[in-house]
Image (spheres, grey):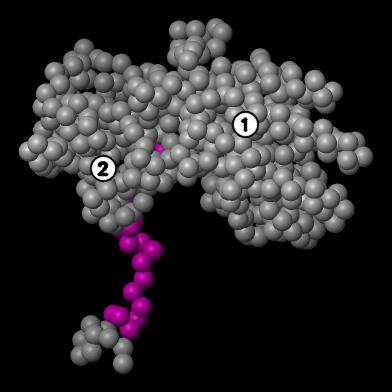
Amino acid sequence: MSSAFFPGDLEQPAPNTSLKPITYALDDTNQPLVGGVNLVELARTHGTPLFVLDEATIRAAAKAYTQTLATAYPGASLPLYACKANMNMGLVKLMEQCGMGLDVVSGGELYTAIQAGFPMERVLFNGNNKTAQELELAIHHEIGRISADNFQDLEFIHKIAAAKGKKVDVLLRITPGIECHTHDYIKTGHVDSKFGFDLSQLPVAIERILEEFRETITLKGLHAHIGSQIFEVKPYEDLIEVMMNIYYNIREQYNGLVLEDIDVGGGLGITYTGQDDPPAVPEAVARIAEKLATYAKRLNYPLPRLLMEPGRSMIATAGMTLYSVGSMKDVPGVRKYVAVDGGMGDNIRPALYQAQYSALVANKVGAPVEETVSIVGKYCESGDILIKGLPVPRIENGDVLVVFGTGAYNYSMASNYNRFPRPAVVLVSGGKAHVLVQRETYDTIIQQDLIPAHLRRVNETSATPA
């Protein structure tokens, strides 16, 4: 696949095709730098495990989407950063600076965007089981679009909007029946999915909006998402044909109704290991834009605003996790286990998806490879294995391991399993590290715990209620 970025920036690789952040370099002592910051020193000053995000890589990914859409698509467009990949208020402000919109999927993500002061007209609220409280929050703050996933969404939106005297702009999420080659757990566009209206339900949903909900809901378009970590552009092109044929039929069947928006979702893949070969963001986006423009013209349909929802391809390559090496166990003739001070609590993806990662020993870059080890975590689970078969120099207690490609679905899926505090998150840029999320402490973990009064009576003779 092509690794070209976009015209005018030809020396810069597309972030989603790189194993490492785009600012990765080695200093005079052969130690790795990202954003001009020494990773070994960063581990010492901020502690480990530590999530690190490279600001330049995030900005380059945003530019790849916004600039390619601006030049390749003749109509209006808006890329929406999929916040489920990784979210905090600092990242929200960075996305705002980069000209991105936001795709949120929960009240918590929406609240984070509100508190960060993000412009609500550039926010889409997604999700398959939105509560009335979440929708009330969205409608109260005049969110740009709500993607209705089911009839309950439509009924809730109608009741809330009626009570507030508002009219809400809505997309209908559909399951288009398109398969893509990815993990079964992250396929979302096929018919057997918990997400969206089945195509057989779509006419009923449209008719209810045009009749029963006509005073409270405006149908702006359709929304589909076919999966994640996708290495092909063809499924997106197939999706556009399916959706635009539906748009054409809607216009024919509902008195010339023209839908203004088309949301083709996200899911473009990234390079986690040398075996991964995703299309570069500009190449994929340009092909999608060209397909939509060409097919709309073929149908004599006005160009809809093109919405995309990049998450992983926006943030994953920018991220790294720093660990400190601890105990080891050598099983002769089988494998050598090397434990780090994190694991499945900060990266559940290897256990959940059999995800693979690239890594190196940061304080021994350039040293000859002497052994192959399996990197494991410190959680009380046999499946807490981060990387199998990693070639490394002679590894020792206290070494700093850097795992690449952890910007997406690592911090956002992190847990307090075994009551471990979640790591801090830092943003590196211009030789400085800026804390985005503080490291949790033991006090953080217990701050929501309560001991009922009857359990505080420690001098009673019976330990259990009668």
The span from disc 1 to disc 2 (Cα, nearest Å) is 34 Å
Q: Position of residue 144 (x, y in %)?
A: 70, 41
Which marked residue is nearer to the observer: mark 1 or mark 2?
2
User: How many numbered circles are shown?
Assistant: 2
SS class, disc 1: strand
What range is drawn magenta here? Answer: 436-456
SS class, disc 2: strand
- Quadrant containing the C terminus in the rendered view: bottom left
The label number, if any, that marks residue 308 in the structure image: 1
Q: Is residue 141 visible?
A: no
Q: Is residue 192 visible?
A: yes
- The amino acid sitting under disc 1 is Met
Q: Residue at the spot x=17%, y=26% of the render?
A: 392
Q: Would you say 109 lies left or right of 150 here? A: left
Check if residue 404 falls in the magenta segment: no
| Quadrant of residue 446 within the rendered picture | bottom left
In the image, farthest residue toward the bottom: 466
Q: Which residue is mark 2?
A: 385
Check if residue 451 falls in the magenta segment: yes
Q: Residue at the spot x=32%, y=48% of the render?
A: 345
Give the answer, above or below, for where 358 lies relative to 51: above
Give the answer, above or below, for where 52 lies relative to 38: below
Q: Residue at the spot x=43%, y=21% of the render?
A: 277
How many residues crowd around disc 1 within 10 Å: few (fewer than 14), some, or many (20 or more)?
A: many
Label 1 or label 2, whichever comes before in sequence order? 1
Q: Position of residue 234 (x, y in %)?
A: 59, 24
Q: Would you say 48 lies left or right of 125 here? A: left
Towards the viewer: 137 or 158: 158
Q: Would you say 87 lies left or right of 219 here? A: left
Q: Residue at the spot x=67%, y=34% of the render?
A: 263
- The amino acid sitting under disc 2 is Ile
